[in-house]
Amino acid sequence: QVQLVESGGGLVQPGGSLRLSCAASGSIFSMYDMGWYRQGAGKERELVAAITSGGRINYVDSVKGRFTISRDNAKKMVYLQMNSLKPEDTAVYYCNAVYGPYFEVWGQGTLVTVSS
């Protein structure tokens, strides 16, 4: 049973930075495609950033140049470095793991609030 645990959320002022972390279980973490999603109040969940098992990365346009996704397969960790945060980045951020057709797993989410 694969589990994902996010951490690093909190309250930050506009223009500030946060680093989200996602710790994964499972012996074949390196084979998972990983992603960060977010869901703001009254909004649908959207993909923010993704990194495949092969290292291919993509971002939603609204965070390009501000957010960076990375992974450490040895530590079974995925990170989301968020810089130049804006109030519209306020949301619950979720870590997601996909392993081919076999499973898709979600973390419990971590709240990011950008406000002065």
Image (cartoon, grey):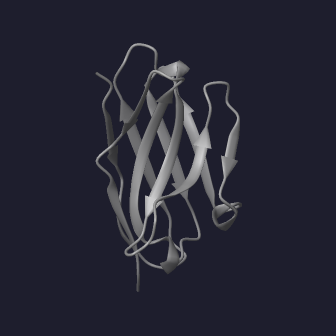
- The extreme top residue here reads 27
- Which residue is located at x 48 percent, y 53 percent? 37
Above-or-below relation of 52 to 39? above
- Which residue is located at x 35 percent, y 59 percent? 9
Above-or-below relation of 21 to 103? below
Front-most of 103 and 86? 103
Front-most of 73 and 107? 107
Report which quarter residue 112 is drawn in: bottom left
Looking at the image, residue 64 sits to the left or right of residue 98; the answer is right
Above-or-below relation of 102 to 78? above
* Residue 44 drawn at (x, y percent): 46, 65
- Location of the C terminus (image quadrant): bottom left
* Residue 32 drawn at (x, y percent): 52, 25
* Residue 75 drawn at (x, y percent): 43, 24
Above-or-below relation of 66 to 26? below
Looking at the image, residue 45 sits to the left or right of residue 92; the answer is right
- Which residue is located at x 50 percent, y 64 percent? 17
Report which quarter residue 111 is drawn in: bottom left
- Location of the N terminus (image quadrant): top left
Report which quarter residue 41 is drawn in: bottom left
- The extreme front residue here reads 101
Front-most of 102 and 31? 102
- Which residue is located at x 65 percent, y 67 percent? 62
